[in-house]
Amino acid sequence: MSAIQKIFRIYGKQYLELYRNRMPSIHKKAMEDICDCRSGSFGTIVYACDTCTTRQCVPCCCGNRHCPTCQQDKTDRWLRKQMDNLLPTHYFLVTLTLPHGLREVSRSHQRIVYAALFSCAHESLTTLAKDKRFVGSPRIGYLAVLHTWGSMLQYHPHLHLVIPGGAVSHNGQQWLSSRQDLFVHTKPLAQIFKVKFRHAMKKAHLFHTIAPSVWKDKWVVHSQSAGTGQNSLRYLARYVFRVAISNNRIKSIENNAITFLYKDRQRKTWKTTTLEAMEFIRLFLNSCKGHRLLKAASLLDHYPENVQKVVPQNNHFSIDLCSFQWYHWSVFIRRLQCSHVLKNQVNTNTCKSLKIAK
């Protein structure tokens, strides 16, 4: 039994008695599925030996995306797929965080605010990337992962983007590489992101619900070199399918209180904190996203499926592409129409070659 399952089985009934009428259906289903996971409620797989007639029964798991028991296999498969998609170039990890003054609006209008977060991040990055001082083309690629909680389970929506250090040229025949230590400057990125997000809130008729001081505050944007991108993908994989807190961080469940570890980001040390059981469940459920909200989005413009070994050639790098496809995953499963939807698909039977300029 996982620690989260134990907490729900002990304190879940009390929580439902207090808040059942105000709980979203996704929270109720998450609690029910996690409580019944591997209990036999979802069926049982029976293994039998033809020789000795020994039988072994294995209860099926719930498969809920918020259950800590069911997500490890999905995480591993997702990570292997993304590792295969890595380009032979340097990468950056960019993080855009919504300020504290926007969190109440974000919690109440998740579909609108999360869509704006993805689209405004895309527009801001492409605006700066087309500047020749940075990349020189807006045709960048990225993998973006939405993260909505902090290490203490507090609501903290922010977006992580793993970005290849460069872009495809306008004519599609050349790879324009960025600097090894810089993709775009964070100060102008934060300013452009703020302006575009403000416009998005006006368009969604939510501007009047936001305090004016939010637009005067400094918005937080971080950018750092990520090497080949593998470590960043491993970091993000934990948030695509895993839940807000892992079992090994929960240290005790007793006397109507939950004690768990959290990381102090400033001192870079692990500390212990204790929450009342009802508050712990509330914070955990706040990390549960609706089934129509996607945790990750990818835009890989001109992405090669099979990239052969990179070979230096006349001060250029040559990449042979066995196939060539367009990729666009929408922010929502409903496939919201965005201005940058890629509709064309290049003939995968054609072998092409790109040159990466220094």
Image (cartoon, rainbow, N blue to C red):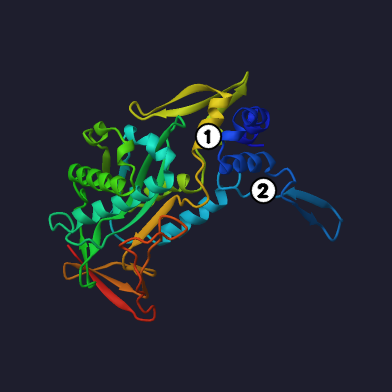
The residue lying at 39 percent from left, 81 percent from top is 349
Residue situated furthest top in the rendering: 255
User: Local crowd at mark 2 within 10 Å, few (<14), some, or many (≥20)?
Assistant: many
Number of disc labels: 2
The residue lying at 21 percent from left, 34 percent from top is 216
Which label sits on residue 254?
none
Q: Which residue is mark 2?
A: 61
Viewer-nearest residue: 340 or 51: 340
Above or below, 268 against 140 in this view is above
The residue lying at 49 percent from left, 27 percent from top is 261
Q: Secondary structure at mark 1?
A: helix
Earlier-in-chain disc, 1 versus 2:
2
Residue situated furthest left in the rendering: 133
Image x and y of residue 111, in percent? 43, 48
Above or below, 32 against 272 in this view is below
Q: Is residue 235 visible?
A: no
Task: Point out the frontmost of discs 1 and 2.
Answer: 1
Question: Which quadrant of the figure has residue 137?
Answer: bottom left
Q: Which residue is mark 1?
A: 284
Left or right of 41? Residue 347 is left
Q: Determine contact: label 1, label 2, CB under 8 Å.
A: no
Viewer-nearest residue: 58 or 43: 43
Above or below, 176 against 263 in this view is below
Question: Which quadrant of the figure has residue 6?
Answer: top right
The residue lying at 65 percent from left, 43 percent from top is 33
Image x and y of residue 240, in percent? 47, 48
Q: Amino acid at mark 1?
A: Phe
Image x and y of residue 60, in percent? 70, 50
Image x and y of residue 270, in percent? 43, 27
Q: Amino acid at mark 2?
A: Cys
Q: Locate the C terminus and report the quarter of the image it occupies.
A: bottom left
Left or right of 7? Residue 127 is left
